Image (cartoon, rainbow, N blue to C red):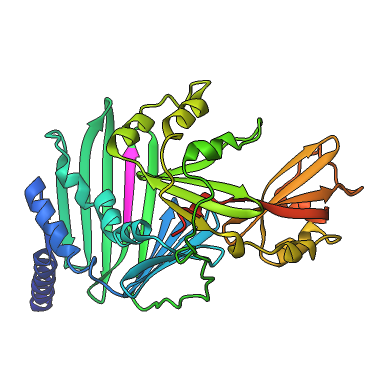
């Protein structure tokens, strides 16, 4: 019996020794950083990967990466988008399935994992604060505990992060930040077998191969002189290119010119809040010659196409892909503004009996209004400059 007890005790000591040997604790910033980097090695290169983010046990967002495709969804906003590369161009598919070039969003989303890791783990090692203390424990390369302590505005702050691995891959990261009596817990759960299938998307109309014609005017001042008394010039400055939209004899034009450095600087120095700001702009650009003119009339819906909606309701426009983006109601006048293919059209509408223009309403409530007439109104800035 005595020999059996001795044998059992020896076996327990061996097991405890083995477990202790598989667990390592360090207490300096440098050693903790090295331990963290070794534990998370390979995470940023994992592909495909899916990350669900929880805050205080509530799902907040989902991020997925699969080759050059990505997907991001925000639960609280009910909004998501896809990203991908085609022919070396970076694209975003918005929540309404519209395709657009978006290098900025692609590059930013492509850094999501790196940003997540920096905000919750690795970034603290670069904080220049000698009062911070670090303690890290690696348990058999299955679990990592990182404990960071410090003070902020005389409040004790503790940041405890637990990272877990399954099949030698990070499966979960939980960071608990305790500041005084407040505690915020953020958890990231990882999967490595989910692929992304891009949805069918709508390719937006572009205005990059437009007809260039002789301008009916030589200078921008001539355009300004033709404005009605209560009419403002429709213009935009795209970097250093001045673009003006105008109508002459039922033809619609884009006039443009490139500003020299001196004029561009003068424009930027104008006081936008000044009462005579528009007049200052007009004075600055009046003598400038129109270098290029585009006739975009034939890119608009034809008068016959617009007349076909007369007698119908706004709902018919929505069904055909128009989006409501504004309205104005006066005593004897009701207008609804709708957009399609980056062009805005003004609808003369009839107020129906079950619609109260003085009540609180949403844009979708306008679909019941009748259409009396419809005409082109303006170009969306996203379409400019046409080329």
The magenta stretch is 174-178
Point out the image quarter for the N terminus. bottom left
Residue nearest the observer in this picture, 50 or 151: 50
**350, above or below 156, in the image:** below
- Left or right of 2? Residue 74 is right
User: Is 354 positioned to the left or the right of 1 in the image?
Assistant: right
Q: Is residue 269 magenta?
A: no
**x, y (%) of residue 201?**
52, 72
In the rendered image, is residue 57 in sight?
A: no
Q: Is residue 262 visible?
A: yes
Q: Nearer the viewer, residue 146 or 93?
A: 93
Residue 81 vs residue 297, the one in the foreground: 297
Q: What kind of secondary structure does the magenta stretch mostly adopt?
A: strand
**In the image, 222: left or right of 171?**
right
Residue visible at 15% across and 44% down? 126
Determine which quarter of the picture holds residue 35: bottom left
Would residue 175 be counted in the magenta stretch?
A: yes
At 20% from the left and 63% from the top, the residue drawn is: 40
User: What is the x, y in percent for residue 254?
Assistant: 51, 52
Q: Residue at x 23, y 65 (%)?
A: 44
Q: Position of residue 380 (x, y in %)?
A: 55, 51
- In the picture as drawn, the residue positioned furthest to the right comes out as 353
Q: Tell me where residue 263 sits by quadrant.
A: top left
Residue 322 vertical placement versus 274 (above, below): below
Q: How far across and how far down the image is residue 98, in percent? A: 52, 65
* Viewer-proximal residue among 352 and 164: 352
Q: Looking at the image, which residue sits at the far top?
A: 275
- Quadrant of image for the C terminus: bottom left
């Amino acid at each position: 019996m005595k020999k059996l007890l001795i044998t059992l005790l020896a076996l327990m000591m061996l097991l405890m020794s083995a477990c202790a040997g598989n667990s390592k604790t360090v207490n300096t910033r440098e050693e903790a950083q090295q331990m963290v980097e070794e534990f998370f090695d390979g995470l940023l290169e994992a592909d495909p990967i899916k990350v669900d983010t929880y805050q205080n046990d509530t799902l907040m967002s989902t991020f997925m990466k699969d080759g050059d495709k990505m997907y991001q969804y925000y639960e609280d906003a009910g909004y998501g988008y896809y990203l991908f590369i085609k022919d070396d161009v970076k694209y975003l598919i918005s929540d309404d399935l519209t395709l657009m070039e978006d290098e900025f969003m692609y590059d930013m989303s492509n850094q999501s994992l790196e940003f997540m890791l920096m905000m919750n783990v690795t970034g603290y090692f670069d904080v220049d604060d000698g009062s911070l203390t670090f303690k890290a424990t690696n348990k058999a390369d299955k679990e990592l505990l990182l404990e960071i302590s410090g003070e902020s505005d005389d409040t004790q702050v503790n940041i405890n992060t637990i990272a877990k691995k399954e099949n030698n891959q990070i499966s979960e990261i939980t960071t608990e930040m305790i500041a005084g009596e407040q505690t915020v817990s953020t958890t990231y759960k990882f999967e490595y077998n989910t692929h992304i299938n891009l949805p069918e998307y709508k390719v937006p109309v572009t205005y990059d191969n437009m007809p260039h014609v002789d301008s009916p005017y030589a200078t921008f001042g001539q355009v300004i002189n033709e404005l009605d008394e209560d009419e403002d010039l429709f213009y935009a400055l795209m970097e250093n290119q001045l673009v003006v939209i105008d109508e002459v004899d039922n033809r619609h034009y884009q006039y443009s010119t490139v500003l020299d450095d001196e004029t561009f600087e003068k424009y930027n120095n104008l006081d936008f809040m000044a009462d005579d700001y528009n007049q200052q702009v007009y004075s600055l650009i009046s003598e400038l010659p129109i270098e290029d003119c585009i006739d975009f009339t034939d890119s608009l819906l034809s008068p016959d196409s617009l007349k076909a909606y007369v007698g119908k309701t706004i709902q018919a426009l929505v069904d055909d892909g128009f989006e409501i983006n504004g309205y104005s109601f006066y005593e004897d006048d009701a207008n609804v503004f709708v957009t399609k293919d980056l062009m805005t059209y003004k609808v003369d509408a009839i107020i129906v009996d079950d619609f109260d223009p003085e009540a609180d309403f949403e844009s979708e409530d306008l679909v019941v209004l009748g259409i009396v007439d419809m005409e082109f109104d303006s170009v969306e800035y996203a379409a400019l400059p046409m080329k």
